[in-house]
Amino acid sequence: MSLFGRFRDSQRGETASLAKERLKVIVAHERQQRTQPDYLPAMQNEILAVIRKYIPIESDDVNIQIENEGQVSILELNVTLPE
């Protein structure tokens, strides 16, 4: 095997690993959306619009989750702000 072939093989392993991690994130995101209330996407868009009035952020920078614990629902909002 040539020197370049060794680099190519190591890059394939890294690329496959990266693709696998990205697929896990996508599947987890899809599963999360199936269990969320109907109003949650609209609420996320409105929160995103309000934050964008003051700070330029991307759609992926806002993450909203609702957890149900007994009779209580907990809303968790995470916003990644640019530096």
Image (tube, rainbow, N blue to C red):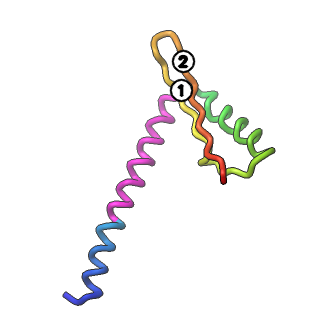
Q: Amino acid at mark 2?
A: Ser
Is 82 left, or right, of 64 in this rendering?
A: right
Q: Is residue 54 above or below residue 31?
A: below
Please state, as top left, top right, bottom left or bottom right, where the C terminus lies in the image.
bottom right
At a point 59% along the width and 48% down the height, the residue shown is 60
- Magenta segment: does it hold 33? yes
The x and y percentages for residue 51 are 74, 41
Residue 73 tag number: 2
The x and y percentages for residue 20 are 35, 56
Q: Residues within 10 Å of mark 1 (few under 14, many from 20)?
A: some
- Determine which quarter of the picture holds residue 12: bottom left
Residue 79 tag number: none
Residue 66 tag number: 1
At a point 38% along the width and 48% down the height, the residue shown is 24
Is 52 left, or right, of 72 in this rendering?
A: right
> Is residue 39 or residue 51 the one in the foreground?
51
Q: Is residue 73 above or below residue 31?
A: above
- Magenta segment: does it hold 17? yes
The x and y percentages for residue 49 are 75, 41
At a point 31% along the width and 79% down the height, the residue shown is 8
Q: Secondary structure at mark 1?
A: strand
Residue reaching furthest to the right: 53
Please state, as top left, top right, bottom left or bottom right, where the N terminus lies in the image.
bottom left
**Mark closer to the chain start, 2 or 1:** 1
- Residues at badges 2 and 1 in contact (C-beta under 8 Å)? yes
**Majority SS type along the magenta span:** helix
Q: Secondary structure at mark 2?
A: strand
Q: CA distance from mark 2 to mark 1?
A: 7 Å
Is 51 left, or right, of 19 in this rendering?
A: right
Magenta region: which residues?
16-36
